[in-house]
Amino acid sequence: MDRAQKEKVVEELGQIFESSGVVVVAHYEGLTVAEMQDLRASMREAGGSVRVAKNRLAKIALEGKPAASIAEYLTGMTVLAYSEDPVAAAKVMDKYAQGNDKLVILGGSMGEEPLDSAGVARVAKMPSREELLAQIASILGAPASGIAGAIGAPASNIASILSTIEEKAA
């Protein structure tokens, strides 16, 4: 890799560290190519990405970035998982690590907040952005459906009374 390519990688990693809601660092020693492809596919489905980069270049890219605290985890064979959604990458990595002991989560960063491996597991248990939006929508919609039911109930009662009267008259 020549100097221009290294500068490009550092720039790309810098953008990742600035724009990601969460970055997870893990050791992946022993993962097969198929297992790594499976991890990448799972991460893509969740809206995140997986990146393997040289630790030295990643440390250079981290300088002055919110996620600078993860530099201590960049030793050995590391993989970076990241997503804009603050919990998506953590969820996928935690789930994959539970099913595959070759993937060991070291830690990560959620914005400027450093996370150890237990912190990544706690973030993984949080609801995703979509789940939170669905919960908020259901909470906001519940009173409206209750009101609609209350307003509609007397009309249905009147209709059933009228049909009963009509049946008796006939």
Image (cartoon, grey):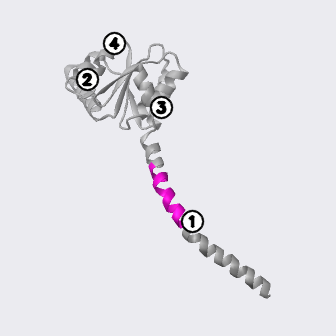
Q: Quadrant of residue 126?
A: top left
Residue identifier under label 3:
125
Residue identifier under label 1:
149
What whole-number distance in Å separates the C-alpha atoms at marks 4 and 2?
Answer: 14 Å
Q: How many residues crowd mark 3 within 10 Å: few (<14), some (14–19), many (20+)? A: few
Task: Tell me whether the residue at label 2 lies in contact with that at label 1, contact meaning CB atoms closer than 8 angstroms.
Answer: no
Please determine whether, in this image, residue 77 is positioned above or below residue 13.
above
Q: How many residues crowd mark 4 within 10 Å: few (<14), some (14–19), many (20+)? A: few
- Disc on the earlier residue, 4 or 3: 4
* Type of amino acid at the residue the image marks with label 4: Thr
Circle 3 sits in a helix, a strand or a loop, which is it? helix
- Disc on the earlier residue, 1 or 3: 3
Q: From the viewer's perspective, is 169 left or right of 39?
A: right
Residue identifier under label 4:
75
Q: Is residue 73 something one can see in this rendering?
A: yes
* Type of amino acid at the residue the image marks with label 1: Gly
* Type of amino acid at the residue the image marks with label 3: Lys
**Label number found at residue 68:** 2
Q: Is residue 5 something one can see in this rendering?
A: no
What whole-number distance in Å separates the C-alpha atoms at marks 2 and 1?
Answer: 53 Å
Residues in magenta? 136-148
**Label number found at residue 54:** none
Q: Position of residue 76 (x, y in %)?
A: 36, 11
Camera-side mark, 2 or 1 = 1
Q: In the orientation shown, which residue stands out farthest toward the bottom?
A: 169
- Disc on the earlier residue, 1 or 4: 4
Camera-side mark, 1 or 3 = 1
What whole-number distance in Å separates the C-alpha atoms at marks 4 and 3?
Answer: 26 Å
What whole-number distance in Å separates the C-alpha atoms at marks 3 and 2?
Answer: 24 Å
Please determine whether, in this image, residue 42 is positioned above or below residue 145.
above
Circle 2 sits in a helix, a strand or a loop, which is it? helix
